[in-house]
């Protein structure tokens, strides 16, 4: 087989294709772990907060997760906002 006018073996081509997808799979796995971690933190925040106001609870969650994930450079602010917007209203 030829690639860019050079002879290449099929194994090398398949290996490069798999490498392309491995980054995507790792990102999904990491976000799954992060989401699970966030849910555990939400439970702790809810148990420790002295309010019954839903808005205050959501703000406390947003604030703590911002500190934990954005300020520590694990996620960007937009990534955190996107993640929270998916489920914060279901709390």
Image: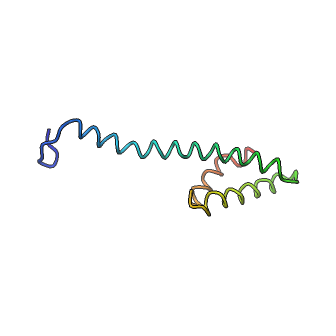
Image coordinates for residue 41, horizontal then vertical, percent: 71, 48
Image coordinates for residue 63, horizontal then vertical, percent: 72, 60
Image coordinates for residue 65, horizontal then vertical, percent: 68, 56
Picture layout, residue 25 above or below residue 84:
above
> Which of the pair 22/83 is nearer the observer?
22
Q: Residue furthest top?
A: 10
What residue is at 38 percent from the left and 42 percent from the top? 21
* Residue 33 as seen in the image, left or right of residue 19: right
Picture layout, residue 57 above or below residue 22:
below
What residue is at 76 percent from the left and 58 percent from the top? 59
Quadrant of the drawing holding the C terminus: top right
Quadrant of the drawing holding the N terminus: top left
- Quarter holding residue 56: bottom right
What residue is at 17 percent from the left and 45 percent from the top? 3
* Residue 82 as seen in the image, left or right of residue 55: left
Image coordinates for residue 9, horizontal then vertical, percent: 18, 38
What residue is at 57 percent from the left and 42 percent from the top? 32
- Quarter holding residue 8: top left
* Residue 67 as seen in the image, left or right of residue 7: right
């Amino acid at each position: 087989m030829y690639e860019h006018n050079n002879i290449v073996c099929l194994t090398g081509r398949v290996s490069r294709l798999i490498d392309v997808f491995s980054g995507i799979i790792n990102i999904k796995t990491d976000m799954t772990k992060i989401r699970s971690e966030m849910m555990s933190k939400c439970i702790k925040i809810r148990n420790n907060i002295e309010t019954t106001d839903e808005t205050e609870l959501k703000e406390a969650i947003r604030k703590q997760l911002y500190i934990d994930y954005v300020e520590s450079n694990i996620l960007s602010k937009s990534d955190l906002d996107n993640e929270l917007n998916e489920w914060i209203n279901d709390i």
